[in-house]
Image: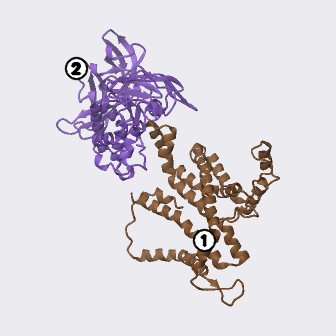
Chain colours: A brown, B purple
Amino acid sequence: MAFTAFASDTALAPQQEPTKRGRVALLLLLPGLAYLAVFFLAPLISLILTSLQRPAEFGDFGQYEYAFNVDNYADVFGAYGGHIVRSIAYSSAATVAALLLGYPLAYFIAVTLRRWPVWQGLALTLVIAPFFISFLLRTLAWKQILSDEGPVLGFLQLVQVLPDGARLTGTDFSVIFGLTYNFLPFMVLPIYASLASLDLRLLEASRDLYANAWSSFWRVTVPLSLPGIISGSLLVLIPAAGDYVNASLDFLGGTGTAMVGNVIETLFIETGNYPEASALSVILMALILVPVAFYVLFTRTEDLI
Amino acid sequence: MAAPSKPAESGADLELVGITKQFPGYRAIEELDLSIPAGSFFALLGPSGCGKTTTLRLIAGLEEPTSGRILIGGSDVTGQKPHERPVNTVFQSYALFPHMTILENVSFGLKRRGVSDYKVKAIEALKLVELDHLAGRKPSQLSGGQQQRVALARAVVNRPALLLLDEPLGALDLKLRRQMQLELKTIQTEVGLTFLHVTHDQEEAMTMADTVAVMNRGRIEQLGAPQELYELPRTAFVANFLGQSNLFTGEVLEATDALIALEVGGRRVVVPAARAARRSGQVTIGVRPEKLLLHLEEPSLDGVNTLGPGRVVDVSFSGVSTQYLVAVPGVGQIIVFSQNLVHGAVINRGATVWLTWSIEHGFGLEDIAETRPHFDDEASAPGLPGVVAEAV
């Protein structure tokens, strides 16, 4: 995974001459490159071309022809700007929530349970266990639990935390909750990986050097687990931003919670407005590239120091 | 952050009162009392597992004693957290923060205590260990010896009342270790702090420390100046851990105010009463291998003890000296170090020899040497086994 980029302190490998070994390496790379070309590059080009299409001049409804119609982008920005903002807000909130929940969990498994490997293994299995059940089923189950007749809402109303008539499903809360729940393991695992290699003697050294527990945590533990925090955050943020299950009406969402993913789904599958759907996809992809670019820049500089 | 303690201008004394540390399943430290005067270089010497590192961790606050009290400069720190104690440690693993530069590592403790001119002080400390030119590097870019010096600077810069050194030279090669020993000693003299050095290397302890405490199985066996410990060990463990010894066990024949005589291998062997701990019954006495002289004919000298005749079973030339192994019937194998004053080995293997040593070089132990001496693989003398009275 990406966080290993931080761990290596080796210098740059010496430049390989184009020898026989180099050719073998190239040969071994070929399947991967071919895969990328067929299943990533080609669809991407197709997507970009589609996003520039315009309605066919004398065609039927839903017929488009290739053009250079940049207006599609302006149109979707105007029409779905709110959805884009909401997607960013939801996915960011879910990332923060997953970090706040995931870090203590990862710390507990990696550091506190270090002396008991059996319990550590069991705890890790429990983190991964939800994957054994379908993503859709789990989200549906949460819909039941959070539903108007469900136990959670009933209890919250009973203790007067929520007023009568309040709802949980269909709210911002339930969508962010669903995103957090579904992507939590992607936060926990990378942080666990970087905390598992944390040398606890460094914490002793920090305590010995007049740092209290809080200060040791911020100045030693957090910086040393930063690679895990960053990769975990990206692994949650990216799929959460494009998610269209949690926010849909069939699951935890409501009429006012649609994210970009839901819009794209509707445009592609229901409306058949391929150019606008594609344009929105390209915008979403570009937005996601921003944090990734920061990540790459960050790892680069870290490696060079 | 509240500064827990002011940087010390000079070292403070350390006192351990009745410290016991019980781990699940075993007792690491047993009723330990120890007092280290301010400004001294104190070495805690012992084999691995003897409790010396645990003692250090208790003083640093990284472990809590089961019972007993720890006083630094007269004030009780037993209940204090590590960051509240005026103590810094140079860890065996160095434990440098990998994500910080050398300068950041060294200024870490100063910053936590809110020292404003931390940068100046950190550079000064780095100058002391001659590494100020590497201040901007990361620990992984430094060699082992340089990392060790950074670890030292990071601790010394805080001017702790007490500096703890946990085998910090263990990972270095011999040449670098010798060099660092001298540097450490110099730094200790320069800054005037109290140093508590834990090591299993008896040579390191003897060259560096003013006072050495030999620790075994959670207790201090003997404490004193290096020379005193070497010349007059009180227990079989100290006699064999600190250098090598020839130990003989026998029945006391006569005990006067001046002398104690016992029977070893059919001969009468004498130890000054002042150098003997026991005066009756079975007694173990010892003599250092370099104090023994070899004779090809039976000597008749006054003021010496004589053993023999024995047979030379092994001769090994080691440059400065030659090491002989002599088997004496009824006594066992005896090690003799002979200085190569003019030329190499003069006595061949198989030769019949007598051994003598001046009466005042012998020492009488408090305990009886076990037939099989407690011999740790970390003890300094590889090759030859500790010598005890054993019938050949």
Give the percent coordinates (x, y) of residue A195: 54, 49
The residue tagged 1 is: A77
Q: Quadrant of the N terminus of chain A?
A: bottom right
Q: Residue, x 59% and y 74% (percent of image)?
A: A74
Q: Position of residue A28 (x, y in %)?
A: 51, 74
Q: Which residue is farthest left?
A: B342
Q: Which label sits on residue B125?
A: none
Q: Is residue B376 above or below residue A217?
A: above
**A2 on left or right of B133:** right
Q: Quadrant of residue B166?
A: top left
Mark 2 element type: loop
Lateral position of residue B300 relative to residue A39, left or right: left
Vertically, is B315 above or below B329?
below
Q: Where is mark 2, residue-wise?
A: B301
Residue A206's x, y, as percent? 45, 40
- Residue A69 position by quadrant: bottom right
Residue at image coords 35%, 11%: B255
Q: Is B230 or B193 nearer to us in this picture?
A: B193
Crowd around label 2: few <14 · some 14–19 · many ≥20 (10 Å): few
Report how far apart the C-alphas of labels 2 and 1 lie in the structure: 112 Å
Q: Amino acid at mark 2?
A: Leu
In depth, the one of B82 and A233 nearer the eye is: A233
Question: Residue A242: where, in percent of width, then height?
Answer: 63, 66
Viewer-proximal residue among B161 and B140: B161
Chain letter of mark 1 equals: A
| Residue B33 versus residue B94 in the image, above or below | above
Same-chain check, marks 2 and 1: no
